Image (spheres, coloured by chain):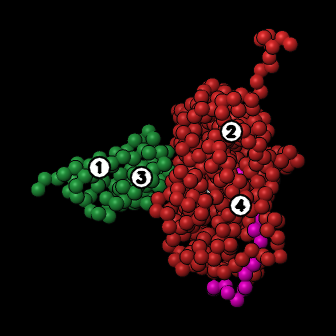
């Protein structure tokens, strides 16, 4: 079976607009399995590709959705 | 009648705004009102007037919806921080980093951010908890306090002095300076108090700077004194300016936020019980209380003539970013005007947004979380002092905060 975009087996990547991040810290507080703070409090990714577990995928979506600057996005497939 | 002449008096600002179809309000944010009334008044204004021209003071715009506030925060070239108090378009003072604009602003934040980062703040938790417990234990047998002066002002001051490694014996001095400075904000009679407090803070940090010059130290102010702004060393003037700003930004804000948190919990038994039963919900509770009670009435200055969502803004106009209205925006949140600890993801601007987003947000969140947890472990049941009338607890802007919060409890219910 091949991975379908958006399907359960699709690769999920988080996209970060580093210019837009101002360090609100909502992502790494709510989704610490996917996002982490750097030394100034700006966002870093724990893994470039979100590991394919339900919990980490849930966290990735939550973190992206909560960003006040819309500095985060998701790429599936 | 020679109505054909071109000499007709120019339209007043109010007439011009009305002609463009924008709402006009007369909103005096300095008037004391009963606790939490400003939030309700601004809820009503937001629903009627997402943008309004306020005739109060010299006149200024108000942005009352979440999306509009965010647009202003994210566009500093149009909405600059060169003036941040809505009634003062031409300030004769300059605060760093508050009133800096990009790209220079970033240079100052690069120096400050690492010292207040989430990692650094997390490492401070044990000492913050210790300070908090010590203070609560000194109060719990009293059975009554003014939460604002006895706890909410003292706790963040102690924590701050610990973090920056200044003597905690100076707590009372800092408390008095901050109270005098904020008493003078938006109150002409208080100007003298404010100026004296500023002068004394400056003298304190001038002495500290001299001491650091003689005996360099690797602590917060030691590092600040030897930091680089871009590719040059920080000046004495910048050091003194930033020190003052940290004191003004970091103490009274936490005090006010604690006041609203405890006011809500004293008057909402169900929410209080949830924190007593499960202290691990404190971070979510704090986030929601920050959203529901956004205390800062922020300001920006318009840098170009423009049509902003149908309203004619002019270069030099002041704009209030009404965070209290925006963070309870009904377009953004379900039952936006209610406190609900079960919201999953809360996006609010109580700490501002864009480049000036609060430097101390991680510290403030931790202080608030620790305070809710440790207080309710020891003093779970308390209420507003029934001998104090509801109209005696008041608030006013531009930084909302309760004048006092008299609480009482049965000392037999205290948990040791
Ligand atoms: C609950 C408590 C707090 C609230 C509600 C709060 C709120 C805010 C807001 C709304 C701003 C943005 C102002 C603007 O854009 O014009 C801000 C900026 C700032 N805050 Fe806080 N603050 C809090 C606690 C603290 C603490 C504990 C510190 C101590 C380090 C602090 C330091 C600062 C500084 C230095 C700025 C200016 C940042 C800049 O202009 O780049 N704040 N705060």
Which color was chain B given? red
> Crowding near pointer 4: few (<14 within 10 Å), some, many (20+)?
some
In the depicted view, which residue is nearer to us: B297 or B202? B297
Considering only vertical position in the picture, is B82 above or below B143? above
Q: Are marks 1 and 3 in contact (CB under 8 Å)?
A: no
Disc 2 secondary structure class: loop
Q: Is residue B63 left or right of residue A53?
A: right
Tag shown at residue A13: 1
Q: What element carries label 3?
A: helix
Chain of the residue where label 1 is placed in the rendered structure: A
Residues under labels 1 and 3: Cα distance? 14 Å
Q: How far apart are marks 1 and 2 (CA)?
A: 45 Å
- Which chain comes out green in the rendered image? A
> Which mark is nearer the camera, 1 or 2?
2
Q: Do labels 1 and 2 share a chain?
A: no
Quadrant in which the N terminus of chain B is drawn: top right
The residue carrying mark 2 is B23
Dot label at residue B317: none
Furthest toward the front, the residue is B1
* Mark 4 element type: loop
What residue span does the magenta drawing correspond to? B399-416
- Pointer 2 or 4: first along the chain: 2
Tag 3 subunit? A
Q: Do residues under tags 2 and 4 come within 8 Å of each other at their CB atoms?
A: no
What's the mark number on residue B36? 4
């Amino acid at each position: 079976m091949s991975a379908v975009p958006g399907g359960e087996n699709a690769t999920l990547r988080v996209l970060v607009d580093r210019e837009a991040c101002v360090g609100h810290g909502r992502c790494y507080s709510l989704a610490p399995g996917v996002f982490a703070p750097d030394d100034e409090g700006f966002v870093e990714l724990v893994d470039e590709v979100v590991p394919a577990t339900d919990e980490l995928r849930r966290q990735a979506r939550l973190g992206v959705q909560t960003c006040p600057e819309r500095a985060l996005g998701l790429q599936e497939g | 009648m020679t109505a054909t002449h071109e000499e007709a008096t120019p339209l007043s600002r109010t007439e011009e705004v009305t002609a463009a179809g924008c709402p006009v309000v007369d909103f005096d944010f300095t008037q004391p009102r009963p606790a939490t009334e400003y939030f309700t008044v601004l809820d009503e204004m937001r629903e009627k007037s997402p943008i309004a021209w306020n005739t109060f003071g010299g006149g200024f715009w108000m942005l009352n919806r979440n999306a509009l506030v965010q647009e202003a925060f994210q566009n500093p070239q149009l909405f600059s921080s060169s003036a941040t108090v809505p009634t003062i378009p031409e300030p004769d003072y300059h605060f760093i980093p508050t009133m800096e604009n990009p790209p220079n602003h970033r240079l100052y934040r690069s120096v400050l951010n690492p010292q207040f980062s989430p990692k650094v703040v997390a490492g401070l938790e044990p000492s913050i908890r210790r300070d908090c417990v010590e203070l609560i234990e000194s109060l719990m047998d009293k059975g009554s306090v003014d939460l604002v002066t006895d706890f909410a002002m003292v706790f963040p001051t102690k924590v701050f002095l610990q973090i920056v490694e200044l003597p905690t014996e100076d707590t009372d001095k800092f408390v008095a300076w901050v109270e005098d400075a904020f008493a003078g904000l938006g109150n002409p009679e208080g100007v003298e108090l404010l100026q004296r407090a500023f002068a004394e803070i400056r003298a304190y940090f001038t002495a500290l700077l001299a001491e650091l010059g003689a005996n360099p130290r690797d602590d917060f102010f030691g590092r600040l004194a030897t930091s680089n702004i871009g590719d040059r060393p920080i000046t004495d003037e910048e050091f003194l300016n930033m020190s003052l700003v940290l004191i003004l930004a970091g103490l009274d804000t936490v005090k006010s936020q604690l006041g609203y948190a405890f006011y809500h919990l004293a008057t909402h038994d169900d929410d209080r019980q949830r924190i007593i039963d499960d202290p691990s919900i404190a971070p979510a509770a704090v986030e929601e209380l920050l959203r529901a009670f956004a205390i800062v009435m922020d300001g920006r200055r318009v840098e170009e003539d423009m049509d902003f969502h149908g309203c004619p803004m002019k270069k030099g106009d002041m704009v209030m970013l009404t965070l209290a209205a925006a963070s309870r925006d009904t377009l953004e949140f379900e039952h936006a005007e209610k406190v609900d600890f079960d919201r999953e993801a809360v996006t609010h601007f109580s700490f501002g947004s864009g480049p000036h987003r609060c430097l101390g947000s991680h510290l403030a969140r931790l202080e608030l979380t620790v305070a809710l947890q440790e207080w309710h472990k020891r003093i779970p049941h308390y209420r507003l002092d029934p001998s104090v009338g509801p109209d005696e607890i008041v608030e006013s802007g531009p930084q909302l905060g309760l004048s006092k919060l008299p609480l009482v409890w049965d000392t037999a219910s205290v948990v040791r």
